[in-house]
Image (spheres, grey):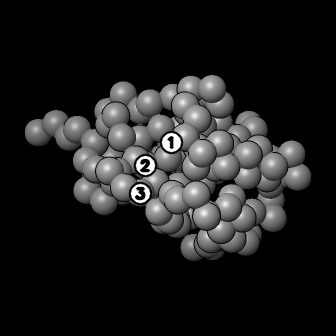
């Protein structure tokens, strides 16, 4: 499998000295190169705004119904940025649209590692 088919994760504590570039450098370069300059700037401004404490809803963020600690942002037609909130850290993952939907259908990576989506027996 190529690295562009897997979600890209990075984790930083949000503090005042953190800049958006610290978050962006942690993305996979293959997926990052596929983004247009407009999409890159949208991601940078979104991360910067969240780091300064602005509400995610101002930027089109929507809570995931199965887990309130997950917030998704639409980045163009083909990409989704997922924000995983914890008490002291924000974890961002960038997905292409197809892999984002597959992860929720399988319920695998979001069930244990990211806070536990509800599973039915």
Is 45 on the left or on the right of 26, as rendered?
right
> What whole-number distance in Å separates the C-alpha atoms at marks 1 and 2?
16 Å
Q: Is 20 placed above or below 42 here?
A: below
Report which residue position mark 1 lands on.
101
Query: Where's the N terminus, which quadrant?
Result: bottom right
> What whole-number distance in Å separates the C-alpha atoms at marks 3 and 2?
8 Å
Q: Residue at x 16, y 36 (%)?
A: 120
**In the foreground, 43 or 1:** 43
Report which residue position mark 3 lands on.
89
Is 118 on the left or on the right of 93, as rendered?
left
Observer-side mark, 1 or 3, equals 3
What residue occupies the far left of the structure in this picture? 121
The earlier-in-sequence mark between 3 and 2 is 2
Residue 18 position in % (x across, y down): 61, 63
**In the foreground, 45 or 111:** 45
Q: Residues within 10 Å of mark 3 (few under 14, many from 20)?
A: few
């Amino acid at each position: 499998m190529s690295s562009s088919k897997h979600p890209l994760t990075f984790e930083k504590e949000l503090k005042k000295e953190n800049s958006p570039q610290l978050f962006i450098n942690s993305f996979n370069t293959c997926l990052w190169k596929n983004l247009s300059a407009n999409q890159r700037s949208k991601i940078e401004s979104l991360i910067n705004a969240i780091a300064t404490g602005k509400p995610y809803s101002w930027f089109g963020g929507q809570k995931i119904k199965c887990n309130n600690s997950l917030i998704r942002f639409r980045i163009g037609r083909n990409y989704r940025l997922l924000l995983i909130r914890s008490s002291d850290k924000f974890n961002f993952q960038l997905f292409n649209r197809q892999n984002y939907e597959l992860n929720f259908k399988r319920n695998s990576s979001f069930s244990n590692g990211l806070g536990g989506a509800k599973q039915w027996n």
